[in-house]
Amino acid sequence: MKGAIVTGSARGLGKEIAVMLAKEGYATAINYRKSGKEAKKTLQVLIEINRNCLSVKGDLTKQQNVKKLFESAKKKFGRIDVLVNNVGDFLYKPLLQTTKKELMGVIENNVATALLCSKEAIKAMRKQGYGRIINIGSTGCDELLAPEMTTPYYMAKTSIWLLTKALARAAGEGITVNMVSPGILKTSIVKKEGVEYTSFDEVTNAILMLIKSSHNGKNMAVARWKPEG
Ligand SMILES: NC(=O)c1ccc[n+]([C@@H]2O[C@H](COP(=O)([O-])OP(=O)(O)OC[C@H]3O[C@@H](n4cnc5c(N)ncnc54)[C@H](OP(=O)(O)O)[C@@H]3O)[C@@H](O)[C@H]2O)c1
């Protein structure tokens, strides 16, 4: 059966991506750190679409939890066709008030999780000769932006852009690695006058387009929606 993993998907954008993939016929594994209640509800929704979906708890900054997620999905699905690296904590704070712990935390949460999960996915995808990896960026992260309140977050997302390029080159035959960079989502804690928010559908449609694309390995497309006003 076709198998997919979406990281950080008990709620928010990750949940919507998981539902889209289940509707597209993927047995989908969701993952969360603490949101057990939300994960249970999301899994119920997914199982009604595809009874093979599953949920795996674990902070993906820890290697052993990444292994557990991939082992559970491989055991149940037999293969991993799609990985969406959606985990990505946000930090909204003036740069000069940011602590080292906060800086390292936001980078570890966004970048290390994407690298650790991609390495596991690529191992499985190379055996299959096929795979699709999508990283979630943030609009403008490919333009070396340094927004006043979100510089460490943008440092992390720009790193994911570089990581996407490097993984696309290294992944191998039949495996594509792309990044989708949404604008501000309706669920964001940031509320701005006059901003047109990005809808979940816009993001999931972009992901689906990239998953269906047949570019082979070395290509990387960055889909960007609605830059901040
Ligand atoms: N929200 C926006 O406006 C916006 C805009 C552009 C890009 N993005 C990006 O889109 C993605 C999703 O954003 P969102 O706002 O939907 O996120 P969110 O509501 O904060 O949800 C994130 C999910 O990820 C999980 N998570 C966080 N760290 C984790 C870890 N280390 N291991 C496992 N699970 C972890 C959380 O689980 P727990 O609840 O259990 O901790 C939660 O279920 C992120 O990459 C974000 O940077 C968001």
Image (cartoon, rainbow, N blue to C red):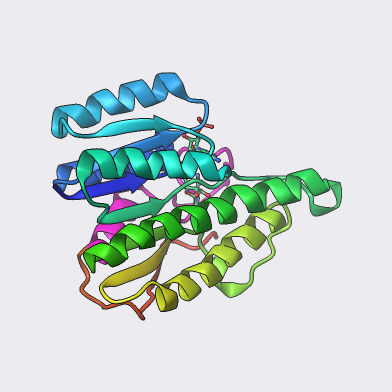
Question: As displayed, is residue 112 above or below residue 188?
Answer: below
- Residue 56 lies within the magenta run: no
Find residue 56 and report its image quarter: top left
Find residue 42 and report its image quarter: top left
Task: Give x and y (percent) for residue 39.
Answer: 38, 26
Give the main secondary structure of the magenta stretch: loop
Look at 57% across and 60% down and name the residue there. 157
- Between 193 and 181, the residue placed more toward the observer is 181
Question: As displayed, is residue 193 above or below residue 49?
Answer: below
Look at 30% across and 66% down and name the residue there. 126
55 lies left or right of 144: left
- Between 21 and 139, the residue placed more toward the observer is 21
Task: Give x and y (percent) for residue 54.
Answer: 28, 32
The reply to whether residue 19 is in sight is no
The mark total stands at 0
177 lies left or right of 212: right
- Between 60 and 128, the residue placed more toward the observer is 128
The reply to whether residue 26 is in sight is yes
Q: For the magenta stretch, what is the residue range? A: 182-211
Look at 66% across and 48% down and name the residue there. 106
Task: Give x and y (percent) for residue 91.
Answer: 67, 45
- Between 148 and 77, the residue placed more toward the observer is 77
Task: Give x and y (percent) for residue 141.
Answer: 56, 66
- Residue 184 lies within the magenta run: yes
Look at 54% across and 36% down and name the residue there. 59
Residue sitting farthest toward the top:
37
75 lies left or right of 120: left
Question: As displayed, is residue 23 above or below residue 210?
Answer: above
Name the image quarter holding the C terminus. Answer: bottom right
